[in-house]
Amino acid sequence: MVSEGTLLGMGNPLLDISAVVDEDFLKKYDITSNNAILAEDKHKPMYQELAEKYNVEYIAGGATQNSIKVAQWMLQVPGATSYMGGIGKDKFGEEMKKNSKLAGVNVHYYEDETTPTGTCAVCIVGGERSLVANLAAANCYKSDHLKRPENWALVEKAKYIYIAGFFLTVSPDSIQLVAEHSAANNKIFSMNLSAPFICEFFRDVQEKALPYTDFVFGNETEARTFSKVHGWETDNVEEIAVKISQWPKASGTHKRITVITQGADPICVAEDGKVKKFL
């Protein structure tokens, strides 16, 4: 029986601005198909252009928050899931709170007084989606918020904890606190590789968190980037999945399982040095 607060997520809450665009739009803003990046100055006009020229859908999102909302929908137990992250004290922030609470998620947001709620452009071309995230207030999250008694209580109550790799860019110390708590209390701790740039440019903090993971998720592009960064000299997704699953663990209580998606191709699941494929 699933109880209240069973699953906790921490991440970067963003208001998704989603639209079907074309290749010219991607080229104009130097966006690679099927990739996820952080917004630079050259991307700032893009959000306005999306809103003016395309049929846009606004969705309360962010990688981890989306996963938690789906889990809540599947579990169908009020308050079975909880979530923490940073938003702004603005209209989009209020929309975020309203949307998440309607979904049944117990949200404990850090609300920044001066920074607007983050946004993410979701550019869809031919079934592939490219993400350009402007973190804004999501980037302001601090572990001080996590340590507050009412928020740390969510960590203590949770049996399963999921954090996307994107949060490594914001509050790696929060991740470490939760990871160490999970290992010490026999909980299931899961992370996602999230994007090639996380594997490339946040390698140190990713490697620090990895030993605590019981599940690691990612796609084939992220897996191959991880392999390249670590000098494994293989693009074979099955081999990479096995290697990640065999990464040293901080706790021997649970074996690590690695799950690598490949779009329409079979999902690779590595466990005990073996790979199973699922369509």
Image (cartoon, grey):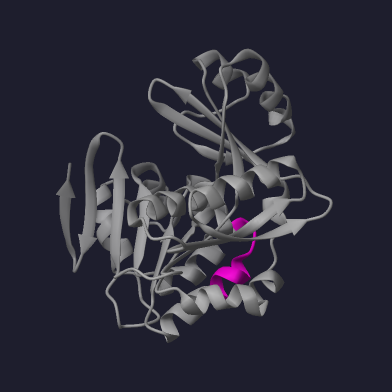
The number of numbered discs placed on residues in the rendered structure image is 0
Residue at 40 percent across and 74 percent down: it is 159
The image quadrant that residue 129 belongs to is top left
Foreground of the two, 219 or 49: 49
Foreground of the two, 98 or 117: 98
Q: In which quarter of the image is the N terminus?
A: bottom left
The location of residue 15, given as percent across then percent down, is 61, 40
188 versus 238 height, above or below: below
129 vs 30, left or right, is left
The image quadrant that residue 153 belongs to is bottom right
The location of residue 85, given as percent across then percent down, is 62, 58
Q: Is the magenta stretch mostly helix, strand or loop?
A: helix
Q: Is residue 170 magenta?
A: yes
75 versus 47 height, above or below: below
Residue at 39 percent across and 56 percent down: it is 231
Q: In which quarter of the image is the C terminus?
A: top left
Residue at 69 percent across and 52 percent down: it is 87
Residue at 45 percent across and 50 percent down: it is 69
Q: Can residue 137 be seen in this view?
A: yes
The location of residue 57, given as percent across then percent down, is 55, 27
- Which residue is at the far bottom? 184
The location of residue 78, given as percent across then percent down, is 43, 60
Q: Is residue 200 visible?
A: no
Foreground of the two, 94 or 205: 94
Q: Is residue 66 magenta?
A: no
242 vs 175, left or right, is left
- Which residue is at the far right? 114
127 versus 167 height, above or below: above
178 vs 270, left or right, is right
Foreground of the two, 54 or 219: 54
Q: Give the range drawn in magenta.
A: 169-177
